[in-house]
């Protein structure tokens, strides 16, 4: 039976769920809805992500290319091997590195904005709303600088961790040994171990903090509050969230490899088009250039899809964790029913309730006990007192019961009434007085027209 809402104006059908069912989500549901979100609002999600990726790619290649050409072309005016040539050479690479760093920050900022737009669109899709890009930006704009700051802080922390973990082997092992044969072996092993630790650390921290963009945009939380809440909400859901990210990353990786193969095939096919009579240097370079352009366009499209899907998965994991730990599904159902009935008060159902928000020391609830119960006491649950069962619990001795079940402890038995005394032969039986005679019934009053009964005889009888 579907839910219903009854209002003063009459019967109103229950609202249909939006992008996801309003209940705790499973692995397959989040994985499927992460890709299905592209169909919910493709003009905003896919179109905006593709445009942003194209703008970022063109801007990065243009700036880095111009700086590289301007700085490296000056080396032709100086004699190679001179002191001036070495100075210009080092300065050129310093300028190129600085330009690459600035454009990297530019790319990170736009990537953070894409994550915020996707989180805002998932919020609207859950409530069955189709928002425009302007409406989504209106929700993202207050948290835009926090999003960019978090993304830059996360990237800076990763770079520092990489420098420390990978630079320590060179300073602690390589330099003291002079990079001899044993020193090189130990340095390589230490670097490999450091890479493994760095990967494990990045996976752990990245998964624990994957809800931060959704918390910044959907809840409007501050950066510190978002970091703390993401760490607490993912407690008990770490492997679930990591599995979703891993599967989506594997799918995107397979797609990128397929695109690389297609690009190589297209590159080999464009050579005969430019020079049908034979392969020349121009035809080979032109075919390679066209194949590279087509491959890069397809890569941009795949990167756009990947960024949208990954951000959608993070937003859905955030909603699932809040449904499980803070009862968000009940708030969403109540808000949608109010809107369907025409009593929308404008409140935000995603705003966390301080009484139900996860706190320090929070631990997820224990998993449900399997049914039927296994024999013996269930781990983590006290043994029931006074109600021994038949699944491994000992039966107490000396307690009367019915069909093997003793009387519960702590409850007094029902009082038994005393038996009636046996009759004594010497005691005369009780006498009972006869009832009084009934009053005579008066004769019925006869009608004045009635005649006395003189004896009636049937015709033909011998009675006269």
Image (tube, rainbow, N blue to C red):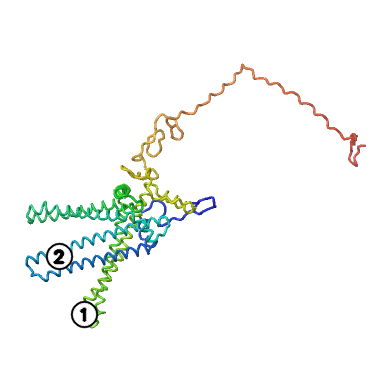
Q: Is the residue marked by circle 2 packed among few (<14), some (14-19), or many (20+) residues within 10 Å?
A: many
Mark 2 or mark 1: name the one nearer the start of the chain: 2
Residue 341 in the image, given as x and y percentages of width and height = 49, 52
Can you tell which quarter of the image residue 43 is in? bottom left
Residue 111, placed above or below residue 327: below
- Left/right of residue 367 with respect to residue 167 in the rendered view: right
Out of 380 and 102, give the one closest to the viewer: 102
Secondary element type, mark 2? helix
Compute the Cα span from label 2 to label 1: 37 Å
Residue 346 in the image, given as x and y percentages of width and height = 43, 51
Residue 460 in the image, given as x and y percentages of width and height = 91, 42
Secondary element type, mark 1? loop
Q: Residue furthest right?
A: 464
The structure residue drawn at horizontal position 28% and vertical position 71%, both measured from the top left corner, is 294
Query: Which residue carries the number 1 mark?
Result: 279
Question: Does any portion of residue 235 appear in the rendered image?
Answer: no
Query: Which residue carries the number 2 mark?
Result: 92
Residue 375 in the image, given as x and y percentages of width and height = 36, 41
The structure residue drawn at horizontal position 52% and vertical position 50%, both measured from the top left corner, is 7
């Amino acid at each position: 039976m579907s839910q219903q809402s009854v209002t003063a104006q009459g019967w109103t059908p229950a609202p249909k769920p939006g992008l996801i069912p309003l209940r705790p989500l499973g692995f397959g549901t989040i994985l499927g809805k992460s890709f299905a979100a592209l169909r919910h609002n493709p003009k905003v999600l896919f179109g905006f992500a593709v445009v942003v990726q194209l703008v970022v790619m063109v801007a990065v290649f243009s700036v880095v290319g111009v700086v590289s050409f301007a700085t490296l072309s000056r080396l032709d005016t100086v004699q190679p091997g001179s002191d001036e040539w070495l100075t210009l050479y080092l300065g050129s690479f310093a300028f190129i590195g600085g330009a690459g760093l600035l454009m990297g920050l530019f790319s990170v900022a736009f990537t953070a904005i894409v994550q915020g737009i996707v989180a805002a669109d998932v919020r609207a899709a859950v409530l069955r709303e189709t928002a425009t890009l302007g409406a989504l930006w209106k929700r993202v704009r207050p948290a835009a600088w926090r999003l960019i700051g978090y993304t830059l802080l996360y990237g800076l922390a990763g770079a520092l961790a990489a420098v420390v973990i990978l630079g320590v082997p060179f300073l602690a092992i390589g330099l003291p040994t002079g990079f001899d044969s044993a020193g090189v072996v130990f340095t390589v092993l230490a670097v490999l171990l450091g890479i493994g630790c760095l990967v494990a650390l990045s996976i752990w921290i990245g998964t624990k903090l994957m809800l931060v963009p959704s918390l910044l945009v959907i809840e409007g939380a501050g950066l510190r509050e978002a970091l703390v809440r993401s760490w607490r909400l993912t407690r008990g859901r770490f492997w679930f969230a990591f599995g979703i990210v891993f599967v989506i990353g594997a799918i995107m990786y397979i797609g990128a490899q397929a695109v690389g193969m297609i690009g190589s095939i297209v590159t080999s096919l464009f050579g005969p088009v430019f020079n049908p009579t034979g392969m020349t240097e121009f035809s080979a370079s032109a075919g390679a250039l066209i194949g590279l352009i087509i491959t890069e366009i397809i890569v941009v499209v795949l990167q756009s899809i990947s960024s949208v899907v990954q951000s959608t998965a993070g937003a859905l994991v955030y909603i699932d964790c809040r449904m499980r730990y803070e009862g968000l599904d009940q708030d969403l159902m109540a808000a949608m029913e109010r809107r369907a009935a025409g009593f929308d008060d404008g409140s935000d159902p995603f705003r966390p309730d301080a009484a139900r928000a996860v706190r320090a020391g929070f631990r997820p609830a224990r998993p449900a006990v399997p049914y039927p119960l296994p024999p013996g006491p269930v781990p983590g649950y006290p043994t029931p007192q006074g109600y021994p069962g038949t699944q491994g619990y000992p039966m107490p001795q000396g307690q009367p019961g019915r069909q093997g079940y003793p009387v519960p402890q702590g409850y007094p038995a029902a009082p038994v009434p005393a038996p009636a005394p046996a009759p004594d032969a010497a005691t005369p039986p009780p006498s009972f007085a006869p009832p009084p005679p009934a009053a005579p019934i008066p004769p019925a009053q006869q009608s004045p027209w009635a005649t006395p009964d003189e004896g009636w005889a049937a015709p033909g009888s011998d009675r006269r």
